[in-house]
Image (cartoon, rainbow, N blue to C red):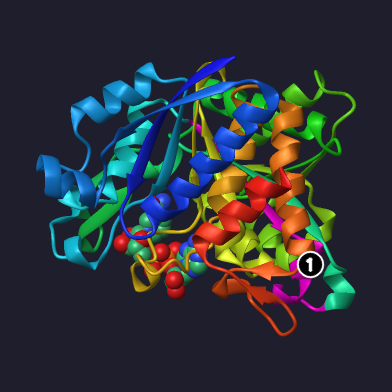
Amino acid sequence: MEFNLAVIKGDGIGPEVTAEAVKVLNKIGEKYSHTFKFAYVRAGGDAIDNCGECLPKETVQLCKNSDSVILGAVGGPKWDNLPGDQRPEKALLGIRESLGLYANLRPAIIHKALSDACPIKKEIIGDSLDIMVVRELTGGIYFGERGYREGKYGNEAYDTESYSEMEIRRIGKIAFETAMARNKKLASIDKANVLESSRLWRKIITEMSKDYPEVEVTHMYVDNAAMQLVRNPKQFDVIVTSNMFGDILSDEASQITGSIGMLPSASLGENSFGMYEPIHGSAPDIAGKNMANPIATILSMAMMLRYTFNLEEEASAIENAVTKVLDMGYRTPDIVSEGTKEVGTRQMGDLIVEAI
Ligand code: NAD
């Protein structure tokens, strides 16, 4: 099969990590007889410098015309003093919105070989963890009505959390289907003891659970979930939650794994269209030094093959290759420890290609 992919290399380590992801996809293409065609487009600081704006129309158009989008990372100190709406990071919200990417899937995985990086006690975590956070990405308080007004105590600012049944249903569907493909356990996180929008959230998820009788659904308040994630993270398999709660809980879950350079993500829209990116930023402190860990971006490619192209065997081939290389003791500087072998960004990419 042939796939047309838009690639946004972005800033900082973005170009370095996306280069390794492209290498890995080419290897998958060779092994499984697929052709991946890459079209490079600009966003973030790279686009500000070369096109005068952080998200040029041509970038959005080319992404829309592609089968899937790969993103490195955007931002850096060079552009930090620009006004908020002109900063590189603005491109992220813009592209998610323009592409209708309403579901964010963020796995928090601890690889056995890296279990020492986890900040939680071994007797709680064991030597592995595998949680998938499904976060609603284009609704809720981040997109609700906001502003300033005259309030009881003078000038006040407000933001509005609102969710439609449609928005809850479409993210719920992705969450239930993700749970069906995994261990059939779903925790829906809300604040239904206080928020009306959360009560609707809980009602719709409960209704939907009748269509997925095999999935064991639990409902949890977000304050309790934040606590349970560090008390006993292994009780979770798939978590589904709103935009703001998901923003916070997915960062908490990712930190439990202890290694930001390892974690991939997928942002999905209609018909499985998606944008795939590492969860980390542009890491300006190590950019251009062949020190960045490319594994988060490479594992994002596995998510792309699985969720957008339905190529399970190919996706597993990438994940197994990453595990193999880690088991062989190879580490980029961010995850190196005593007794392991330090390698650079490009060498890590080459080793994973070889393992495939
Ligand atoms: P960051 O994730 O870029 O870096 C945090 C720390 O983790 C740094 O010490 C960095 O060296 C390290 N790190 C990150 N990724 C790594 C990798 N693959 N391998 C090895 N080490 C890695 O976060 P930050 O420093 O808060 O932000 C830097 C810039 O990135 C900012 O401009 C920020 O706005 C932007 N950012 C972009 C995205 C995105 O594009 N999706 C996400 C977060 C931050």
Q: Residue at x 58, y 47 (%)?
A: 298
Q: Position of residue 341 (x, y in %)?
A: 67, 75
Q: Quadrant of ligand 1?
A: bottom left
Residue 266 in the image: above or below residue 98: below
Q: Secondary structure at mark 1?
A: helix
Residue 349 in the image: above or below residue 212: below
Q: Which residues are magenta?
A: 102-121
Residue 69 in the image: above or below residue 332: above
Q: Position of residue 233 (x, y in %)?
A: 78, 61
Q: Residue at x 33, y 60 (%)?
A: 12
Which residue, given by chain and number where applicable, does mark 1 sit on? 113
Q: Quadrant of the N terminus?
A: top right
Q: Is residue 9 magenta?
A: no
Front residue of 82 and 73: 73
For badge 1, the amino acid type reads Ala
Residue 115 shown left or right of residue 100 in the figure = right
Q: Residue at x 55, y 38 (%)?
A: 266
Q: Quadrant of residue 97?
A: top left
